[in-house]
Each structure stands twice: as structure tokens, then as C-alpha cells.
């Protein structure tokens, strides 16, 4: 039963690793992988000396870390609030509503966001105009773009994560709440003393596993929303790889950057799974 899956993983995950050789070559497509000139670490040297490399690295970490932090806080808060709703019909309706954006691609949502956030006739700026606030170029201002990316990503994905925490809430023994009510605990004290400790292992698990995504700031989202105006604050490693490799045809440098990102991500994923095992007793095997 495992053979088909193993074959697919081998074809699409392991065979392409041979292409990592390009990171050490001045790759020319007509000469192929084994005919191109070997340059050693020159591609990495060129990469690390690019004037905007460290700014791009900072943008990647900044956006990804804030996505991870708010990607934990918002779903936990919404899950606790939904858990307090007594009517199941209302709860199911809200769950469906917040879950729907998860199924839409950033190709679709990118167009929606561009229209909504337009500084000339966008819905958001029209609303701000009622309060005499000047139009804000959310997708063209370096001060606003990173936070627009972070908030829109949280809006799209928090519904999916909320379901995980709602499932964790169902494992809490209801008798604990009954005992707390008898002892005179209000809703806030019940949440602080029972609900949060009850789902703490899941929170720790989700937090540690998300550590491996520190260098994944969301290529699909940023590629569909950014422009040269916001390269300074919105350019990330994945978009830089795309421009260097596919636009500028510097295949060796782009592969070197991809290999650098993969090695760092591999180390972070390894650390995150080790922490998940030590702290939350989570293991793959």
C-alpha cells in the first residue's frame, strides 16, 4: 500500500534534488547539469553580497514571524468565543463563514484585495473618507504593505486553525466548569484557569510546529499583491528566487538562494519537531 506513495515522493521530491548542483555551477541550459562550468561557492558569494539580500531576509523573517504569532492568537481567541455560544446553529453558521476564505486561492483573493484596498475607489478608503482620513495606498506604501499582508493572511487562514482549537476544547471535562461555577468563578476565571490550561498542549504543539515556517512568508500571497513600489518592505526570499531565476535567468544564483533557504528551513523544522516531542510529547513515528 505504501509503494505508490513512495514512488510519487521519490519522483517529485528526491529526483529534483539533483538540480541542486546548479547552485555550484554557472548553469547554461544548453549544456545541462553536467556540462555547465563548475564555480564552487561563487554563487553564494554573489548572493550574500547583493545589496538587498539582507533586507529581503529581514522582510521574510518579519512577515513570517508576525503571521505565526497572530496566527496563534486570533484562532485561539475566536475558538474560545465560539465555544461560549450556546446555539449550535449560530456556531455552525459562524464557523462556515470564517472557514470559507481558506478555500479561495490568492489569485482570486489578490484581485479582491486590490479592488477593496484601492486608494481611489476602494471600499476601505471610501469608509475612511467618512472620517476625513486621507486615502491610504495599502499595497503601494512600504509602511503599510507588510501589515496589510499579515492581516489579510490572518483573515484568510484563521478559520482553519480555529477548528483545531475547537476540537481541543471538546476534550475538556465539563465537570471542571461545573465545579468552578460552584466555587464562584466567573467566565473570565473559568477561561483563565480551565480553558487555556486545557488546550495548552495543543497551543504548544501548533507553536512549535510553526517554527519551521519562519522562512515561508507566503509566495502566492505576496506575488499576487506586491509591486516594485514595495520591494523594500515586501520582497521575500521566494519572490527574489522567482525574479533571479525566471526573470533574470540567473539559474545558479537562484538555486543557491533556494538551497540556502531549504537548509535553514530543514534545521528549523528539525528543531521544531524536537521541541514538539520534548514539550508536547508529539512525534511523527
Image (cartoon, rainbow, N blue to C red):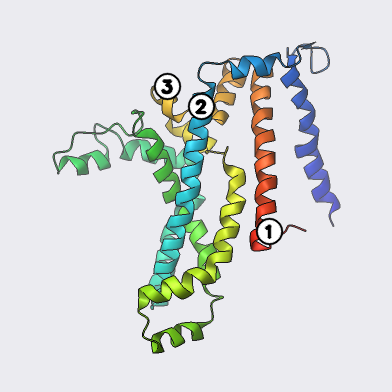
Q: Residues within 10 Å of mark 1 (few under 14, many from 20)?
A: few
* CA–CA distance in space, label 3 to label 2: 13 Å
Q: Quadrant of the N terminus?
A: bottom right
Percent position of residue 187, x then y = 36, 76
What's the residue at 40%, 26% (across, down)?
230
Return the disc, 2 or 1, that comes first in the chain's sequence.
2
Q: Which residue is mark 3?
A: 228
Q: Residues within 10 Å of mark 2 (few under 14, many from 20)?
A: many
Q: Which residue is mark 1?
A: 278
What's the residue at 52%, 38% (across, down)?
217
Which of discs 1 and 3 lies nearer the camera? The answer is 1
What's the residue at 55%, 69% (across, down)?
168
Return the disc, 1 or 3, that comes first in the chain's sequence.
3
Return the disc, 3 or 2, that comes first in the chain's sequence.
2
> Circle 3 sits in a helix, a strand or a loop, which is it?
helix
In the picture provided, is 108 more to the left or to the right than 270?
Answer: left
Q: Which residue is nearer to you in this view: 258 or 16?
A: 258
Quadrant of the image occupied by residue 244: top right
Q: Which mark is residue 56?
A: 2
In the picture provided, is 54 more to the left or to the right than 34?
Answer: left
Amino acid at each position: 500500500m505504501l509503494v505508490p506513495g513512495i514512488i510519487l515522493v521519490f519522483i517529485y521530491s528526491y529526483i529534483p534534488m539533483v538540480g541542486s548542483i546548479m547552485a555550484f555551477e554557472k548553469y547554461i541550459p544548453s549544456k545541462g547539469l553536467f556540462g555547465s562550468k563548475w564555480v564552487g561557492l561563487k554563487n553564494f558569494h554573489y548572493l550574500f553580497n547583493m545589496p538587498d539580500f539582507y533586507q529581503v531576509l529581514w522582510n521574510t523573517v518579519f512577515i513570517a514571524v508576525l503571521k505565526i504569532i497572530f496566527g496563534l492568537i486570533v484562532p485561539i481567541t475566536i475558538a474560545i468565543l465560539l465555544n461560549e455560544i450556546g446555539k449550535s446553529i449560530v456556531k455552525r453558521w459562524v464557523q462556515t463563514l470564517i472557514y470559507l476564505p481558506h478555500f479561495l486561492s490568492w489569485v482570486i483573493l489578490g484581485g479582491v484585495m486590490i479592488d477593496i484596498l484601492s486608494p481611489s475607489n476602494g471600499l476601505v478608503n471610501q469608509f475612511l473618507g467618512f472620517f476625513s482620513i486621507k486615502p491610504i495606498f495599502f499595497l503601494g506604501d512600504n509602511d503599510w504593505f507588510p501589515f496589510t499582508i499579515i492581516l489579510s493572511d490572518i483573515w484568510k487562514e484563521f478559520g482553519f486553525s480555529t477548528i483545531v482549537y475547537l476540537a481541543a476544547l471538546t476534550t475538556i471535562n465539563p465537570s471542571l466548569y461545573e465545579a468552578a461555577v460552584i466555587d464562584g468563578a466567573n467566565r473570565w476565571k473559568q477561561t483563565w484557569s480551565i480553558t487555556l490550561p486545557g488546550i495548552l498542549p495543543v497551543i504548544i504543539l501548533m507553536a512549535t510546529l510553526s517554527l519551521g515556517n519562519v522562512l515561508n512568508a507566503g509566495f502566492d500571497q505576496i506575488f499576487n499583491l506586491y509591486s516594485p513600489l514595495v520591494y523594500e518592505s515586501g520582497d521575500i526570499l521566494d519572490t527574489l528566487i522567482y525574479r533571479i531565476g525566471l526573470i533574470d535567468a540567473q539559474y545558479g544564483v537562484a538555486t543557491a538562494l533556494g538551497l540556502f533557504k531549504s537548509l535553514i528551513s530543514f534545521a528549523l523544522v528539525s528543531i521544531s519537531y524536537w521541541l514538539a516531542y520534548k514539550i508536547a510529547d508529539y512525534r511523527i513515528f
